Amino acid sequence: MTPRRLPPPLLDAALVVVALLDVWVNLDTHEPLRLAFALSAAFALFLRRRLPLLTFLLTLPAVLLSDAIFAALAALFTLASLTRRRGLLAVCALVFTISDMTSWPSPNFDLSKTSTLITLGYTAATAAAPVFLGQLVQARRDLSLRLAQISEARDHERLLTAQTVLAVERAQLAREMHDVVSHQVSLIAVRAGALQVGARDTEVKEAAATIRRLSVQTLDELRHMVSVLRASGGRPAELTPQPSLADLHRLVESSGIETELQTDLPDGLPPTVQRAIYRTVQEGLTNVRKHAPGATATVRIRQEGGAVRVTVTNTAPNRPALPLPSAHYGLIGLRQRAALLGGTVTSGPMADGGYELRLELPAIGTP
């Protein structure tokens, strides 16, 4: 567990208090000049973060005139932790050593005496200690910053790796869609074309033409989807123009179902709301075609107050439905789309054997 650090203002105040205690222990109130310089040095520590060099210079007179040296040591430590100029630190440590060795106003700096040399070594070590400690704090701070940068670079590398894996999966999915799905849809289109040419019944010809047209349209959309998947990692591919309410009539006409379309909507609905309405009608007609052969459908779209309501209903089927695979992903997608726009989607059978799909959205959606 990492120990909690004191806030900077509180730490500065604590250093000032310790410096004042050092003044109280080492100075007498009968020495006003020395006391004034020592007090100035103690209170100068409030400037140590913003002006470290000036703070150290303000503490030197107290070192020169008295034994209250804590403020100078604290200022020297702060300077060493903030600057990268090693020469300046060496000069400051030397100045502190000389100031502490000198007894002003009667300097006694005789290097011929052994006691003076011992005192010089002790004082130089005292000056070097905060310098080394400050440099250690600076190195620790630089190391922490470097570790943070390495961690960020590693996270970015992991993201790139995940994107590469995703690109590979999308390319594989594109190959599968192209090799399997497009092949089968192409066969459907070919067989429908052959049926259209060889059939004599008019209804069969129309049904075969509808199947062939829808197959060709599906192939076009599938090819575009494959190109979008293969474009992963490169320049984003342009998406197919999104449908709007203007495309509803064409959707109903190409559905191959006898459908009554009733719309009463104002102009200017947000594109997201228009797309949700289109996809709901599309899903409803698709389900009618799959699960209710021979049924007729009714699509009602209207606005009541601040809500848009869409209902797709169909009558009961008049012949058995072919068993087709279905995972209900269409309805799940509709519900998710409606939830994002603040609306709801409900569906269920009706009393007469038909089925109803209902969408309700706020008239103002997210563009």
Image (cartoon, rainbow, N blue to C red):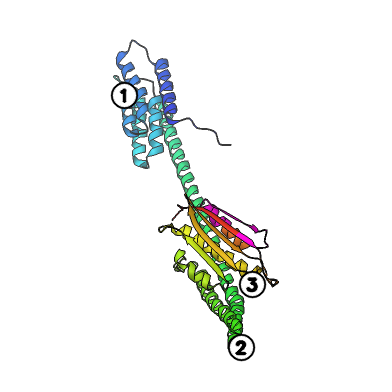
Q: Is residue 342 magenta?
A: yes
Q: SS class of the residue under badge 1? A: helix
Mark 1 crowd level (few <14, some 14–19, many ≥20, 10 Å Cα): many
From what the image shows, is residue 39 above or below residue 217?
above
In the image, the segment drawn in magenta is 335-356
Q: Decide: marks 2, 1 in contact (CB < 8 A)?
A: no
Mark 2 crowd level (few <14, some 14–19, many ≥20, 10 Å Cα): few
Q: What type is the residue that disc 1 sits on?
A: Pro
- Real-space CA distance between mark 1 and mark 3, rounded to the nearest whole angstrom: 105 Å
- Real-space CA distance between mark 2 and mark 1, rounded to the nearest whole angstrom: 115 Å
In the rendered structure, the answer to whether residue 232 lies left or right of residue 56 reads right
Numbered circle sitting on residue 294: 3
Query: The N terminus appears in which quarter of the rendering?
Result: top right
Q: SS class of the residue under badge 3? A: loop
Q: On the image, numbered disc 1 is attached to which residue? A: 61
Query: The C terminus appears in which quarter of the rendering?
Result: bottom left
- Real-space CA distance between mark 3 and mark 2, rounded to the nearest whole angstrom: 20 Å
Q: SS class of the residue under badge 2? A: loop
In the rendered structure, the answer to whether residue 203 lies left or right of residue 304 reads right
Q: Earlier in the sequence, mark 2 or mark 1?
A: 1
Q: Position of residue 98 (x, y in %)?
A: 34, 29
From what the image shows, is residue 349 above or below residue 51?
below
Numbered circle sitting on residue 200: 2
Q: Earlier in the sequence, mark 3 or mark 2?
A: 2
- The residue sitting at the front extreme is 352
Q: Residue at x 29, y 16 (%)?
A: 33
For this rendering, which residue is in front, 38 or 48? Answer: 48
